[in-house]
Image (tube, rainbow, N blue to C red):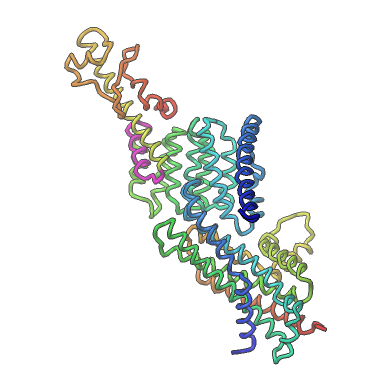
Amino acid sequence: MSRAAIVAWNTFREAVRDRVLYNLVFFALVMIAAAILVGEISLQIEDVVIVTLGLSAISVIGLLMAVFIGVGLVSKEMDKRTLYALLAKPLRRWEFLLGKFTGLLLTLTVNMSAMAAGLFVALLYVKHTLVRSDAVVLVAVYFILLKLALVVALALLFSCYTTPLLAILFTAGLYVAGLFVGAMRNVQSDLMAPALKTFLGWLSYVLPNFSNFDVMSSAAHGRAIPGMLALQNTAYAVLYCGIVLAAAAAIFSRRNLK
Amino acid sequence: MNAVGTRSLALCAVFVVGFAGVWRLQQRIDVRLASLHQEEDDLVLRSGPMLKMISMEHAPLMADLYWTRIVQYYGDKRMRHDPNLDLLWPLLDVTTTLDPNLLPPYRFGSTFLAEPPPRGANRPDLAVELLNRGIRANPDAWRLYEDLGFVYYFNLHDTTKAGAAFLEGSRNPKALIWMKILAAKVAEQGETPETSVFLWNEIYNSATNDDVKQNALTHLRLLKAQADCNALDALIAEYTKRTGHTPTDLRELVRAGILLQVPVDPLGYPYELNTRGQAEMDPTSPLSKDQPAYQKPL
């Protein structure tokens, strides 16, 4: 097994030991409550609300995990001084980072797979049957995973050169900004200087575009998502994660750990 | 009993007595607050685009929550017989901006808006605007054309536009065949009791919601009662012509052999004669009580 894979596996085991997967109980309770209650208090949206609530819960829970655990991936190892023991072994710093990133991604994948299964159980309870178009929900879950991979990469990058609190703020701030990239690109104002407009346009391509992964509405209404979009979003996430992890590795390699 | 047991018992007593006190106190507070109750209808954020921005990627979930709020708002108003539905349109506006593809707010919301008080906000113009917005966002949803046709027919009494809406909807390849029949019937006959019966039958047969089904059934029963009264009036005229005097009771028509028995309305209550000598429903019939709220002159 490669050195990065060993770090990844241990990161996953550590997350399980830290009872990270307990959030699944919370998710299950939310889905059960929604499945039972919505039919009583609303009108004709029982299945739609299961999908939107389920996807929102998966996104929020995943986001909290990605930001808070992602930021702690490096800082925790430094605080506990286990990083020094690790780096004394034949393990390059970039391999350590890559292993940490992959480990958290594995944790998120397991977690989200369980939540997606729970969502489908709730959907089956409400609709009594599942149809082919419900598979679009799986695509939406996959897109959330891609989004979270980007968030983990950003959290890792920030945690390489600043304090955990600031890293959380930077990651959260960039996430929110990344949701409005489209608005930034298409901003219309006669008062704005052309140079600023151009700058915003460029900035909108530099910032991670999280709205690419937002297909919740399509999933809720059973509208098919083009396969090409899934491919393009995968390529976007891989490329962007690669850039951010390369930057993180460069910073971490130069960091004085004494 | 040892000290630990005594302490546990005392703790249990504190819990029971304490929460009983909280329960009683809360009831009194509720009474006090009810006396201070004011109209609490409020919608802090009326801008759909602003709410959509704040909701970030969770806008579809927010739309579901807003739709649930609309259902609760409308239901609460109906139960309290409060005709003020001023917030209905802003709530529907926000909901459909948050998720333009959510169909129930267009379909049920247009009914809530179009129906006269106490069943709705008496704003068929806004219902038309809402449905047109829904059609623009969901051109494949042929049911929205059907709803638009119903609003034009029943609420705005515009048979030309109703027929056009049914016809436009029928062009959708997914539309059921009877959309063409609706279009043809409305275009051919205009606003007649027969057309109304036909349309309410379609609503009754296609509705999946119990309230909508019940509403259609009440309309159908009232239309049947109206048709019965019209037929009875014709028989009364014949009796008057034959005997030279106006009957004071429908049993006179039975005795004259014009009727086999005194006919009953769809709920089983016998028809009566009013002071002008015309047939009408028994005032104690639940259908008669529904009539002012449901039936509009044709």
Most common SS among magenta residues: helix
* Residue A93 x/y as whole percent: 72, 85
Find out whether residue B239 is within the magenta segment.
no
**Residue lying at the far top of the rendered structure:** B244
**Residue lying at the far front of the rendered structure:** B1
Residue A27: quadrant of the picture: bottom right
Q: Nearer the viewer, residue B9 or B98?
A: B9
Find out whether residue B192 is within the magenta segment.
yes
| Residue A182 relative to residue A113: left or right | right
Where B153 falls versus B260 (above or below)?
Answer: below
Q: What residue sits 62% from the left and 69% below the top?
A: A147
Q: Nearer the viewer, residue B236 or B58?
A: B58
Residue B35: quadrant of the picture: top right
- Residue A236 seen in render: no
Q: What residue sits 36% from the left and 21% below the top?
A: B284
- Residue B234 seen in render: yes
* Residue B58 x/y as whole percent: 60, 57
Q: What residue sits 56% from the left and 65% below the top?
A: A24
Q: Quadrant of the N terminus of chain A?
A: bottom right
Look at the image and give the residue range highlighted in magenta.
B191-209
| Residue B291 relative to residue B8: left or right | left
* Residue B55 x/y as whole percent: 64, 55
Residue B266: quadrant of the picture: top left
